[in-house]
């Protein structure tokens, strides 16, 4: 019986060793899981607070929230990069427009300088000053037109009346003087 008892004892000792190995491996795995969990919590910017099940659920919830925020940030980044590409492509068109506008301005400025010099102004005269003087000239033109109108309506009519009266007076004086000149 000794050999059966010894065999059973050896089997029990082997099982105890196996149990100790399994418990040691389980402890190593728990420590590893705890470290991973602590690392995950620190990456999420929080601390663990509850039991293992609630911690895991909370950790997963926060991780999903972080993933959602990261996805949104990536979407915004993609949108901004697209806008940047569009802006870069439109800058050539805008630079062309600026160049065209500058050329048109330069042409206008040259013609303005020529017109200002031809009108007898200094080249540095301001457009506002010229505009004010043109407005005064336009007012003078309106007044001259009014004077011409008054002249044609009133003075010319009066002159015609005076000319008519002078003609009548002349013909009357000739009639009065004609019989006298015949008697002398």
Image (cartoon, grey):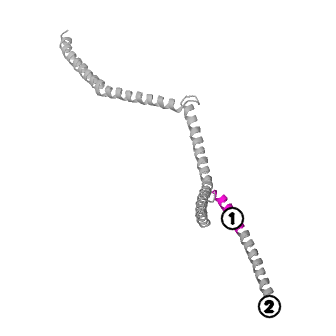
Residue sitting at x 81%, y 88% = 2
Disc 2, SS? loop
- Residue underneath mark 1: 34
Neighbor class of circle 1 (other Cα within 10 Å; few <14, some 14-19, many 20+) is few
Indicate the quadrant containing the N terminus: top left, top right, bottom left or bottom right: bottom right
Neighbor class of circle 2 (other Cα within 10 Å; few <14, some 14-19, many 20+) is few
Q: Is residue 146 magenta?
A: no
Foreground residue among 80 and 51:
51
Left or right: 76 in relation to 136: right
- Displayed quadrant of residue 51: bottom right
Foreground residue among 21 and 118:
21
Closer to us: mark 1 or mark 2? 2
* Residue 169 versus residue 75 in the image, above or below: above
Disc 1, SS? helix
- Residue underneath mark 2: 1
Q: CA distance from mark 1 to mark 2?
A: 48 Å
**How far across and down, in percent of the image, does residue 7 sit?**
79, 87
- Displayed quadrant of residue 70: bottom right
Foreground residue among 64 and 30:
30
Write down the region rendered in magenta. 30-46
* Residue 94 versus residue 59 in the image, above or below: above
């Amino acid at each position: 019986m000794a050999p059966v008892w010894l065999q059973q004892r050896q089997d029990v000792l082997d099982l105890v060793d196996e149990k100790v190995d399994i418990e040691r491996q389980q402890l190593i795995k728990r420590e590893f899981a705890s470290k991973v969990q602590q690392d995950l919590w620190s990456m999420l910017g929080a601390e663990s607070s509850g039991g293992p099940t609630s911690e895991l659920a909370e950790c997963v919830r926060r991780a999903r929230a972080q993933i959602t925020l990261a996805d949104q940030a990536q979407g915004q980044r993609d949108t901004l990069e697209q806008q940047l590409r569009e802006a870069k492509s439109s800058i050539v068109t805008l630079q062309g427009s600026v160049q065209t506008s500058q050329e048109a301005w330069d042409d206008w400025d040259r013609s303005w300088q020529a017109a200002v010099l031809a009108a007898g102004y200094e080249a540095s005269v301001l457009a506002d000053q010229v505009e004010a003087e043109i407005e005064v000239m336009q007012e003078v033109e309106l007044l001259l037109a009014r004077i011409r109108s008054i002249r044609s309506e009133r003075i010319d009519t009066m002159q015609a009346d005076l000319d008519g009266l002078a003609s009548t007076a002349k013909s009357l004086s000739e009639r009065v003087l004609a019989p006298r000149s015949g008697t002398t």
